[in-house]
Image: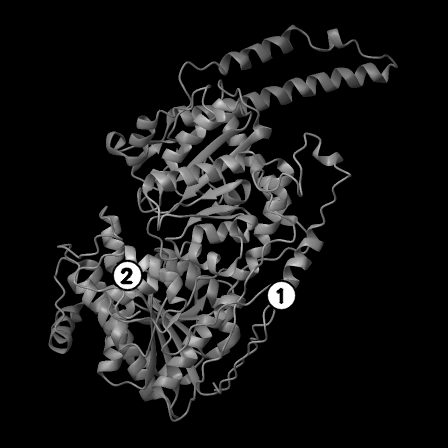
Amino acid sequence: MPLARSLSVTSLSGLEEWDEEFDLEDAILFEIAWEVANKVGGIYTVIQTKARLTSEEWGENYFLVGPYVESNVRTQVELIEPTNPALKRTIDKMNSSGCKVYFGRWLIEGSPYVVLIDIAFTAWSLDSWKSELWELCSIGVPWFDREANDAVLFGFLTAWLLGEFAAQCEQPAHVVAHFHEWLAGLGLVLCRQRQLPVATIFTTHATLLGRYLCAGNVDFYNKLEAGDRQIYHRYCLERAAAHCAHVFTTVSQITAIEAEHLLKRKPDIVTPNGLNVKKFSAMHEFQNLHAQSKSRIQEFVRGHFYGHLDFNLDKCLFLFIAGRYEFSNKGADIFLEALARLNYLLRVNHSDVTVIAFFIMPARTNNFNVETLKGQAVRKQLWDTAQTVKERFGKKLYESLLVGQLPDVSKMLDKEDFTIMKRAIFATQRQCQPPICTHNMLEDSSDPILNCVRRIGLFNSSADRVKIIFHPEFLSSTSPLLPMDYEEFVRGCHLGVFPSYYEPWGYTPAECTVMGIPSISTNLSGFGCFMEEHIADPTAYGIYILDRRCRGVDESCNQLTSFLFQFCKQSRRQRIIQRNRTERLSDLLDWRYLGRYYIAARHMALAKAFPDTFIYEPQETAGFRYPRPASVPPSPALSRHSSPHHSEAEDNEDDERYDEDLEAEKDKVNIRQPYTLPMKNKSIENKSGLLDFCRILTVSNVDLTEDY
């Protein structure tokens, strides 16, 4: 079937021409993942956002394969008849053989085709397939591990689908099957064991052992031994998939090193995670969106701190951390400690800036906190009271002007008006401090965040310049407390703080970047390493990289405190300039740029699986490199004599013009290209730059530097 290919990765400023031609007329791409139309974690975001670009490249020859979940299908998938004749025959034959396979369109950007397999319908085959797995691979799956049992069912059904499709094709087709994570990996192992004519790719977004060690509060980078965690069978499935794949990829350089020593195979290529970047027609429209969302957060803050609203909201900075509730893994521990030190610095320097730090991490709760709900009710009541008095005042003013008299202000408000206002003021009296947590926690006494708050003593008192709000639930526009989607909330904040200890990639700081919000990341996260590689001076662009690789915890905490304090010293104008620079990096995270790595991986797999048909010669494809901005970074410590100066009257600085468009053009002219895209047999580039990291890792019975 002809391929409707319209993709050419040339739309980014400063990016060289890159359009490697491959004859894909008879090629079919299957992308297999447990999170296709099934939101579980970050892989869902990867596949969902990448689908549009992949659909543009492969057209009608692109199919996603995932599990059938009825509740998800009802809202996300439109079931239709298969358009590919060979695939239709394949699905019909599987359904007639005791399976339930569905075909449809995923209702996301790009509208890709999806093949959804109902694993529950074939659960009767589980025991026989587990026996076959033991005979073929000597991997035993215990009965109590439901997730691994699902992986077995999904793997065998996926291999059945691919094998049947290859048999149903009238002419030999060149099939590429891209498997994500260990839950889908068994299908890849079976494809190779059965010698199916399929080019296979396996992508690990985080190694199982690394994820479990960090979740278990183990010093991951110094103690990598597995221990007794009852995941050996899962590890075997993951490692088998990595070794059986024609092409093995990871999402970051730091995960590549992890995979090399835990899975014992060097990745062939690193495929960073991207996003669909929405460019606005009006210049700086994202700044207007920031102002709108910020005003909505301010309304929530007014209600939360009613009775203790003794700080200026116009000089209030909103910081946030979000993600899975992994206290040490996500860096919440070091963030809280840095907030305590920041509070001290702001107080001793008599700063008029107030910092409100939001913790958006889901935990076990039973409902909203009564005091928090009361605060929003009081705020709404005050607003209604003000509107009532305003209408009465306006009516009297109107009647006075109608008769041609200037109003007597002393008579415009009568006793009833004053009574209404006094009642409203009385309702704002509060004897207790504003709450830290917005919900009733089920495990309040053992909660890590709340215990740390008790230790550092930040209880939202009037004397504190740093306030904390713990929202142990994901944000939703239907919430009665903070009715905002996550994207709206991020746009309204001033800084995202993600001092992660273990983060294979890190979508949260990436999402901040494409929305023009500065963020703090670490050099132990894939995103942080990626930005360090691509940007000459990340701090100048609002990307603060915290060193957690070569510094102790206390040193890293001091560095984080310094970042936060310097950010608090910026003027409003400086923050606007920094947001402009941050948003300018969004092209770097666009799938139209990062998608080239996936294209290279697929071409490499085709050449390895079908060497008589495809010849792959790695291109010396250079990447982005953002230089230092044309003007000095807007940090008060670094740009005292450059743009911009601090001024209370920021709008009247006629002596200092700042043209953001001119700044952007200067930066584009100076873009450099310092590194080469990793290709065949070049799994980890820039080894010397990563050697210091390797030295601090300690892997049991493994010499980390022997290959260097």
The secondary structure type at the circle numbered 1 is loop
Mark 1 and mark 2: span between their CA atoms?
35 Å
Q: Which residue shows up at 74% across the image and 41% down it?
A: 656
Compared with residue 131, is residue 27 higher up or lower down, i.e. above or below? below
Q: Is residue 464 left or right of residue 325?
A: right
Q: Which residue shows up at 73% across the image and 11% down it?
A: 412
**Which image quadrant is residue 640 in?**
top right
**Which image quadrant is residue 384 in?**
top right
Q: Residues within 10 Å of mark 2 (few under 14, many from 20)?
A: many
User: Closer to the N terminus: mark 1 or mark 2?
Assistant: 1
Q: Residues within 10 Å of mark 1 (few under 14, many from 20)?
A: few
Q: Does residue 598 appear in this view?
A: yes
Q: Which residue is mark 1?
A: 13
Q: Amino acid at mark 2?
A: Thr
Q: Does residue 107 appear in this view?
A: no
Residue nearest the viewer, comparing 153 with 689: 689
Compared with residue 685, is residue 406 higher up or lower down, i.e. above or below? above
Image position, residue 588 (x, y; %): 53, 61
Compared with residue 610, is residue 35 higher up or lower down, i.e. above or below? above
Image position, residue 543 (x, y; %): 50, 49
Image position, residue 235 (x, y; %): 20, 64
